[in-house]
Image: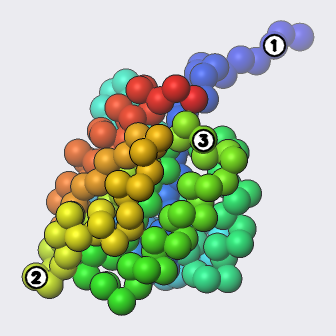
Amino acid sequence: MGIIKSKEDHKLPQVLLMGLDSAGKSTLLFRQQQGVVMETSPTVGFNVATVELDKKTSLTVWDVGGQKTMRSNWKYFLEECKVLVFVVDSSDRDRMGEAQKALKKILNDENMKGVPLMVLANKKDLSYTMTIREVSTLLELDSYVDLVWEIQACSALKGMGLHQAFISVSKLIKKSVR
């Protein structure tokens, strides 16, 4: 009897996709993975997908449900995280305070030390969205002085900015000290 070995002995980097419910996380993930907009419903639990950026680079992305009742479970997904992608609905000013508190709670978890952050300001295809500067200010990103972070605009529906954002996520993982 021989030993069966997988062709790939290395683990793909784990990316956590988090944010409040209705931010567009699942739409964004499926658009990036499959290139089309799929009808989604609120995520109960999580979705996992492998996103291929090019022939050499793939990321395992965990899309974790963002409903208020799910957020207490977020801590269980943080242990193997290589980069956090926090998605906000840039058209929803009323929930930015709630998003800021949720992000702060995640980043204060011990497992997140040294983990880079990518904030995606989603729904930029709408005409009444906040600027990147407004989103950054409302999330208080400048207060995270020991954190490597980036923020980018995107539209899950139109596909705008998604590939560039995940290329940046890949670069953040390579630069990460963790």
Amino acid type for the residue under numbered disc 3? Lys
Dot 1 falls on a residue whose secondary structure is: loop
Residue named by callout 3: 113
Residue named by callout 1: 3
- Single out the residue that lies furthest toward the left: 127
Dot 2 falls on a residue whose secondary structure is: loop
Give the residue displayed 38% in from the left and 79% down from the top.
96
Q: Residues within 10 Å of mark 3 (few under 14, many from 20)?
A: few
Q: Is residue 87 left or right of residue 36?
A: right
Q: Mark 3 or mark 1, which is nearer the start of the sequence?
A: 1
Q: Residues within 10 Å of mark 2 (few under 14, many from 20)?
A: few
Residue named by callout 2: 127
Give the CA distance from mark 1 to mark 2.
58 Å
Give the residue displayed 41% in from the left and 55% down from the top.
143
Q: Is residue 79 left or right of residue 88?
A: right
- Is residue 87 visible in the rendered image? The answer is yes
Amino acid type for the residue under numbered disc 1? Ile
Q: Mark 2 or mark 1, which is nearer the start of the sequence?
A: 1
Residue 141's image quarter?
A: bottom left
Where is residue 16? Give x, y as percent.
53, 53
167 to 107, vertically: above or below: above
Q: Nearer the viewer, residue 88 or 156?
A: 88
Is the Cβ of the residue at disc 3 closer than 8 Å to that at disc 2? Answer: no
Dot 3 falls on a residue whose secondary structure is: loop
